[in-house]
Amino acid sequence: MIKSKFPEVGTTIFTVMSQLANEHQAVNLGQGFPDFSPDEKLVSLVNEAMINGHNQYPHMAGVKELRDSIAEKMHTLYRHAYDADTEITVTNGATEALMSTILSMVHPGDEVIVIEPCYDSYVPCIKLAGGIPVFVPLSYSINKNPAYSIDWNRVEDAITAKTKLIILNFPHNPTGITLKEADLDAIENIIKNRNIFLIADEAYEHIVFDNKKFLSLSSRENIANKTFVISSFGKTYHITGWKVGYCCAPKALTAELRKIHQFVVFTVSSPMQYALAAFMKDASTYSGLSSFYQEKHDFLHQALLNTRFKPVKSEGTFFLLADYSEISSSNELDFTKKLAIENGVALIPVSAFYKNPSAVGSNNNMVRFCFAKKNETLEKALEVLSSI
Ligand code: PMP
Ligand code: GLN
């Protein structure tokens, strides 16, 4: 008899839907990964690193060259000077950065505020640390643009003497909303004079639409001083399978994070790190990503307007949500499963990003599309979607 530590946890919705897509040869617009290749130059740099002998354990915090390149990027883009030796840690994707950060900060009984809908890994990490997740819902109206918004008064109201951390994720998965200067003002006010820390999951930092500038939480000194800023090379360079990410945080916070990181993974694949260090020195490797994805976003949004789905515009990420209430009244999980099995298109139910996915309140007839796909893949899916 095994006493499960996570009796309520199953397999992630992303794995479930990709498996379903494989089984039924469905077009996979579910799990967030590109179906095209990374830049050949990046791949050759990995090869080169291996040939040059970078095949043993790198530094526990990450290859120095990569930490230097990250520090340079953070300073150029967000004007925050992180110390590469004491404030930057290379992690096994953003996923490991999140787990290690949360385990390092949250003590049993601590409360952690998350914004709902929220990325699926946060709550299990909080629970594993013995913490208590506190959910603050985004406001939603299909007739507004953007359809989702964050009410900082609700975040403020959720704070108690036990609040240790607030986890923010902008550009937001799954809704695609981003932060404005006024949001940063609100965040600054919320943490002022409080012993509360932040995690900024900025995995989609380089995918922001309509020529808007991405506002990293590292760009405000008073926020950066209390924040773990996490990102992922997976999204930026079409290499989700390499699992390389990083965390930038003030020295004292980084020291705590590394105590956990060193025993979770110890360190991260060496040749990938050398390759990324060299590749990211050229800012054009990420500066064109927003316009690359904007085209795909606009194409999918426009095409969905000619179907019975009601698409919602995203401000960033490679996801877009759409309402399917004209097509079906099934709950979101049933609708997406049926769509994958019977129609051959895999999507993600937005309800999977809620505390209780099967609750009526978590089901708003919304599905998530991933448009990090070749145009022919999107067209193939649209052929099906326009006929239902
Ligand atoms: N945070 C968010 C919001 C994500 O969407 C993802 C993955 N898509 C991650 C973290 C995990 O990133 P990684 O694949 O680098 O672990
Ligand atoms: N973050 C990706 C998404 O939102 C999936 C990553 C995963 O499968 N764990 O689709």
Image (spheres, rainbow, N blue to C red):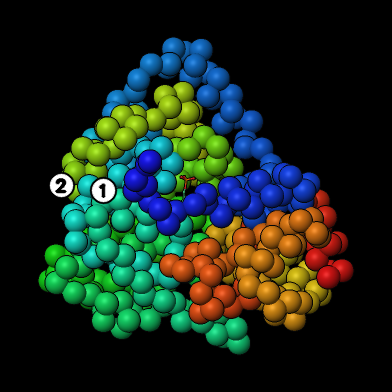
Which x, y percent locates residue 36?
A: 69, 42
Between 375 and 324, the one nearer to me in the picture = 324
Which x, y percent locates residue 309?
A: 73, 74
> Is residue 309 positioned above or below 372 on the image?
below
Q: Earlier in the sequence, mark 1 or mark 2?
A: 1
Which quarter of the picture shows residue 60?
A: top left
Between 23 and 365, the one nearer to me in the picture = 23
**Which residue position is annotated with label 2?**
252
Residue occupying image coordinates x 43% and y 41%: 93
Which x, y percent locates residue 300?
A: 73, 64
- Asked whether residue 178 is in view, the answer is no
> Is residue 241 positioned above or below 143 on the image?
above
The residue most toward the bottom is 143
- Relative to residue 355, is residue 349 drawn left or right? right
Mark 1 in CB contact with mark 2 (< 8 angstroms):
no
Residue occupying image coordinates x 27% and y 32%: 263
Q: Quadrant of the N terminus?
A: top left
**Which residue position is annotated with label 1?**
103
Residue occupying image coordinates x 21% and y 37%: 259
Between 238 and 76, the one nearer to me in the picture = 238
